[in-house]
Image: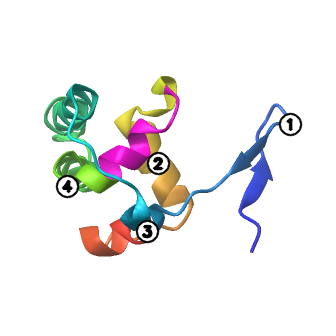
Amino acid sequence: MDNSAKNGLGQEIRAVRVNTVRSWPVRSTHGSMQLAQRFRDFALREARGNSPLYQQRALDIAEDPAVLAVIAELPTGKQQPNLVLAAARAHGASADSYPDFRHH
């Protein structure tokens, strides 16, 4: 199945399934700790009171080194929690549970 599409600028974009992270090396680095903190901050400052689902998923991601490793591979501007969560939902990630969300 081809997971590519074109964005509004005609550039090809590809969907990446999060369940591929199982084979990725997970490193505990200062950068991944900063990324985890970014997701925690988003959960507590932006999603709290606005989106219980995004709040919980951001907290879940902040505690998941494998998913953080995948997000860390994205360009810095694409690592924003709201973009990551919206992209995951747009590609059919489950809202029912974090394991379902994570393995989509």
Q: Are marks 1 and 2 in contact (CB under 8 Å)?
A: no
* Range covered by the magenta-colored residues: 67-75
The spot of residue 2 in percent (x, y) is 77, 67
Name the residue that disc number 2 marks. 86
Q: Which mark is residue 19?
A: 3
Could you give the CA–CA distance between mark 1 and mark 2, rounded to whole angstroms? 20 Å
Looking at the image, tell me whether mark 1 or mark 2 is earlier in sequence order: 1
The spot of residue 90 in percent (x, y) is 55, 57
Q: Amino acid at mark 2?
A: Ala
Looking at the image, tell me whether mark 3 or mark 1 is earlier in sequence order: 1
Element at badge 1? loop
Q: Is residue 69 magenta?
A: yes
* Crowd class of label 1 (few under 14; some 14 to 19; many from 20; radius 10 Å): few
Could you give the CA–CA distance between mark 4 and mark 2, rounded to whole angstroms? 15 Å
Looking at the image, tell me whether mark 3 or mark 2 is earlier in sequence order: 3
Q: Is residue 97 left or right of residue 37?
A: right
Q: Quadrant of the C terminus?
A: bottom left
Q: Quadrant of the N terminus?
A: bottom right
Element at badge 4? helix
Q: Nearer the viewer, residue 6 or 66?
A: 66
Could you give the CA–CA distance between mark 1 and mark 4, rounded to whole angstroms? 33 Å
Name the residue that disc number 1 marks. 10
Could you give the CA–CA distance between mark 3 and mark 2, rounded to whole angstroms? 17 Å
Q: Amino acid at mark 3?
A: Asn
* Crowd class of label 4 (few under 14; some 14 to 19; many from 20; radius 10 Å): some
Name the residue that disc number 4 marks. 60
